[in-house]
Image (cartoon, rainbow, N blue to C red):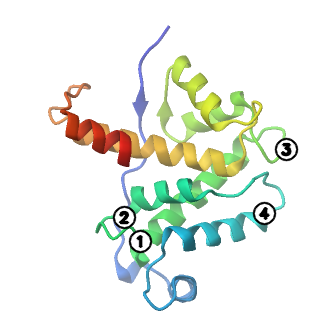
Amino acid sequence: MDDEVVADFEEEEEISEDDVDESFRSMFAQLSGDDMEVSVRELRTILNRVVSKHRDLQTDGFSMESCRGMVSLMDKDGSARLGLLEFQVLWNKIRKWLGIFREFDLDKSGCMSSYEMRLALEDGGFKLNNKLYQMLVARYADSEIIDFDNFTCCLVKLEAMFKAFHALDRDGTGSAELNINEWLLVTMCG
C-alpha cells in the first residue's frame, strides 16, 4: 500500500485592487454592507443563496462551521472577516471547485460517490492514501454520498491542514515536531 500523501494545489493567487473588475466590486459592496467585509454569517447567506440557484447540485446548505473554515483559510489580516481581495480569491476557489465537482460527478446526479470524490480530490491536487480517502468519505459523506457543500468543506479543510503542516515543516523534510501550543493551534483553529 502506498502511504504517500501529497498536495499540489495552486498557491494563493496574488491579486491587487486593480485585478478586481467593477461588476465584482459592485456585487461585493452589496453583499458586504457598510463595513465592506464579509462575516462568517454573511458568507453562509451568500453561498447558500448561490448554490440554491444551481438546480444540478445536491446540497443541504453550508453550515456556520464550514463557512468559519473558509474565512479562516482566506483571512490574511486576522479580522475573522473577508475583505474584497480575500473574498475574490475565495470566490475563484469555489468556482474552480464547482467545476471539478461537476466534471467528476460522472453520473450527473448532483452529488458524488466515494469513487467520484477520490477522482475529484486528485484532480484538485490532493494525492492521498486509501486510509485517508476512507476517513474523508466517512467524515464528509452522508450514506456514501457527498454533496457540493461537503465536498467544498473537505477541500477547505485539506488545504488548511496542508498549509498548516508546511508552515510547521520548517526544514521541508516531510515531518514536523510540534509543541503543545502549535498542536492546539493546528487542531483547534485549523
Q: At which x and y percent is residue 178? A: 20, 31
Q: Are marks 3 and 1 in contact (CB under 8 Å)?
A: no
From the viewer's perspective, is 104 left or right of 82? right
Gap between marks 2 and 3 measured at Cα: 33 Å
Residue 6: x, y in percent?
41, 29
Which of the 4 image quadrants contains residue 133? top right
Q: Nearer the viewer, mark 3 or mark 1?
A: 1
Identify the residue at horizontal 50%, vertical 20% (top origin): 129
- Circle nearer the N terminus (3, 4): 4
Secondary element at image label 1: loop
Which amino acid type corresponds to the residue marked 1 in the rendered image? Arg
Residue type at mark 4 is His
Q: What is the x, y in percent for residue 18?
A: 37, 83
Discs 2, 1 touching: Cβ within 8 Å? yes
Tell me the tag on residue 109: 3
How packed mark 3 is, by other alpha carbons closer than 10 Å (few <14, some 14-19, many 20 or more), is: few
Which residue is the site of mark 4?
54
Label 4 crowding class (10 Å Cα cut-off): few <14, some 14-19, many 20+?
Answer: few
Residue hosting label 1: 81
Q: Residue furthest left?
A: 171
Marks 2 and 1, the one that precedes in the sequence: 2
The residue type indicated by label 2 comes to: Asp
Up/down of 3 relative to 149, above or below: above
Q: Which mark is residue 137?
A: none
Q: CA distance from mark 3 to mark 1?
A: 34 Å
Whole-angstrom CA distance, mark 3 to mark 4, is 13 Å
User: What residue sits 42% from the left and 72% below the top?
Assistant: 82
What's the CA distance linking mark 2 and mark 1?
A: 7 Å
Pointer 2: what residue? 75
